[in-house]
Image (cartoon, rainbow, N blue to C red):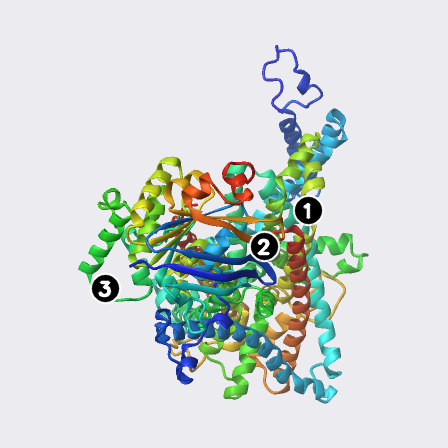
Amino acid sequence: MTGPAPGQVTAPEIDRLEGKDVSTNSLKASTDRGRAGDKIFSGISLAAGVLILAVLFSVAVFLLVQAAPTFVADPAEVTGGNGFTAYILPIVIGTVVAATIALLIATPVGIAVALFISHYAPRRFSRAFGYVIDLLAAIPSVIYGAWGYIVLAPQLAKVYTWLAENLGWIPFFTGPASQTGKTMLTAGIVLAVMVIPIITSLSREIFLQTPNLHEEAALAMGATRWEMVRMAVLPFARPGIISATMLGLGRALGETMAVALVLSPGALVASLVKSGNQTIAAEIALNFPEAFGLRLNELIAAGLVLFVITLIVNMIARFIITRHQEFSGAN
Amino acid sequence: MAANQTLQRRQSHLTRGHLPSYAVWVVLAASVVLGAALATLIGFSVVGWAVITAIVFVITATIVTAVAEGERKAKDRLVTFLVYGAFLIALLPLVSVLWTVLERGVPGLNYNFLFTSMNGVTGAVDNQALENGTPVLGGAYHAVVGTLQITLWATLISVPIGLLTAVYLVEYGAGRGLTKAITFFVDVMTGIPSIVAGLFAAALFSLLFGPGTRTGFVAAVALSVLMIPVVVRSTEEMLKIVPNELREASYALGVRKWRTITKVVIPTAISGIASGVTLSIARVIGETAPILVTAGFASSINMNVFSGWMSTLPTFIYYQILTPTSPTSPDPSTQRAWAAALLLILMVMLLNLVARFVARMFAPKTSR
Amino acid sequence: MSKRIDVKDLNVYYSKFLAVEDVNINIEARSVTAFIGPSGCGKSTFLRTLNRMHEVIPGARVEGEVLLDGDNLYDSAVDPVSVRGQIGMVFQRPNPFPTMSIRDNVLAGVKLNNRRISKSDADSLVEKSLQGANLWNEVKDRLGRPGSGLSGGQQQRLCIARAIAVSPQVILMDEPCSALDPISTLAIEDLINELKSEYTVVIVTHNMQQAARVSDKTAFFNIAGTGKPGKLIEYGDTTTIFNKPAVQATEDYVSGRFG
């Protein structure tokens, strides 16, 4: 943004080494010390930036090194006795299912809340409402987990019993329902609560960027508020909404504590109201503290799988955002 | 919508075909009554009543609007209801969480809880407290110490790296490929699951210092992985809004670039930077998963981040709930967990308030 | 104090784009020289090359020589920082440092360079510089207040005080009055008249009356069309340029036929 390119910085020391007479030009009487300061400072800030790349790279490498024994181990020794793939697949599916439930709830609610704050709420309060939603994001995940475990799950247990009795013919609601309420559906709901503020805050930002001219044009044509939103706001915000959802997905996939506390894990089952299923993050959190030997490598390998999945999801989201920014001419 | 203010007045041409404003309230009242009736049919509960009332109200009001004002207005009204409803739904868990934490946390949050550890507190102690009706013993002092220590170290690691990286991105690296790469990967890093950050630190230290190395410092490194991208992003934003004119003014006085950055650019942006750092602390102070896999768990005070296991408030909450000290009577443990949760929420809220305060009060008044 | 500037065969580029072509100009010490011309003709760009401030714009570079009393600014061993210490600059919009008081703004050049200065020296430097910028009487009672609390015209004079506090040889001014009201403009113009007894002043202005009022010599820059480089068309005594210009384009411009 500013400053001369380093290439243009000239070096009086070269002249001195070459024995040139530098005294004729009064402008050359500059201090080498100051110049060294410039070099050192730009050097350490560059080093900090490179360090970040190195950290991310080493996250991948260290996980890979520590996970490697799992892939070459005798399949019988891996937990479950059928090799790593058989071990990881059910919990990958569990992770995806939990995140999907969370997104199915959080996406419509999150977008609607963003619309509420940006276009529906009285102007005077919209800022305050924004803070309230930010509060949701500020609460630590372990507290959501504890709340899900102690408050939400027992409440939902009644609903699950009803669902299993009346809608049991749908595979998702096959009975007998969990009496504690600690099921996949509960985990998904708690995750949704945690994902809503992410989707809301990103969507809200984009809704507020909608060109006023488009909105006014729509209103001037006699559109109702909803028609204005549908014609002017949503099309403009679509890429933003998609990437907000992707980022929410990344969060839901990687969230640990809520699931570890709220789900009583077990083998993969289709029913969402029975106990069972497991996610990668919760599997690691629950087992890592007591793990040693190959089990430790297994869990790190599971972490690697989670890392790769979230990395892909996040990169797609970031890619959409970056492309969108280039098109909209923002910044 | 402000029609029919005086009944005598001739209806304005502009308000013809509009429902009177009281119509909504009539529909609402009818829905409440109908909701009560339906709720009684399937087994009465306040929640059921509220849900049925809401559904009946939205459907009826939409139909009434459709009949009286046409389909477009009805759609508009339906969406308005849904949007307001979504906000109320989003508020529910917030209110419920805060209420739960306050209601259950306040009784346990006393001097004893704040200033004693769990050292020597066993299931038998808890059972005895219940039997005799004496106050619950044991507290979270060790966890508070651990939280502060680990967070402090994470901050000490993250802030210099984050700040300098942001300086590089904004002041030195404009338009370079490396800048784009760093920006992209910093964004990606914000999405790293916290448990993976914990595994990374655990894997790194077990390679360097032998398997099973778990100390507060390992946890601090794990938290730094989560904290650095937040610091970079917020600092970057703040440096970008420092007007270029100030940099030019400084250069024109014959001031070197690094002194311009440290003496002009950063001081101008410092309130925003400080606020961003505070928010990033608030974000990591509540992290649980990375601590579980890096710092282990302790029930006594450990002041040394470089050796021995450590507890933090989040892991304290987690273990008190999942593995109560006395498996037969978990109530004392639950009470301690909620007290710790209240303490943690207070810390996070305080940090958030401080961040807002810093951002607002110390913002330099530029001429714009 | 005060040195002359001689520019020889100067070309200015933005990456590959030639922005200003082949400028030769001799600026006398202790005089006011005005650069006039239509927007985009490269006069501000050229002004920046006189103290190497163009280098803060990525990709900008020059060919040719700029001599400050015979010393080439673009000599390979010259540090741009020491150039700027001798040739100060005042910008279009007043830009006092928002984190500093009025006093600290004046002392910015000294303090930012970490030079030690005793309190009494600092006090006399502040008074001398503010008096030099005709601002002392207005601010002497509130030196500790933020500089951004002043009016636009006062802020601009504060920026001039800040520039002269590092005792430069030359002061470059890039449209210093374009963001100011007429009364503040008058105060700055008076100040420029006083400054030329001690400094070489070069001013870029859009306002031809201002050029006529304050300058001894005027240089007219023009551009043949968009995408073409800016050129120095005519340079001479201000009275000549405004009354009997040698080039038709100059006459058209000063008589208001275009620009």
Disc 3, SS: loop
Q: Residue furthest left?
A: C120
* Picture layout, residue C43 above or below residue A274: above
Disc 3 from disc 1: Cα separation: 58 Å
Camera-nearest label, 2 or 3: 2
Q: Could you tell which of marks 2 and 3 lies nearer the N-terminus?
A: 3
Q: Nearer the viewer, residue C78 or B84?
A: C78
Image x and y of residue A218, in percent: 69, 35
User: Is disc 1 surrounded by few (<14), some (14 to 19) or many (20+) residues within 10 Å?
Assistant: some
Q: Nearer the viewer, residue B32 or C129?
A: C129
The residue indicated by pointer 1 is A236
**Mark 1 belongs to chain:** A
**Mark 3 belongs to chain:** C
Tags 2 and 3 touching, CB below 8 Å: no
- Amino acid type, label 3: Ile
**Mark 2 belongs to chain:** C
Q: Nearer the viewer, residue C113 or B333?
A: C113
The reply to whether residue C152 is visible in this rendering is no
The residue indicated by pointer 3 is C117
User: Is disc 3 surrounded by few (<14), some (14 to 19) or many (20+) residues within 10 Å?
Assistant: few
The residue indicated by pointer 2 is C229
Disc 2, SS: loop
- Amino acid type, label 1: Phe
- Amino acid type, label 2: Pro
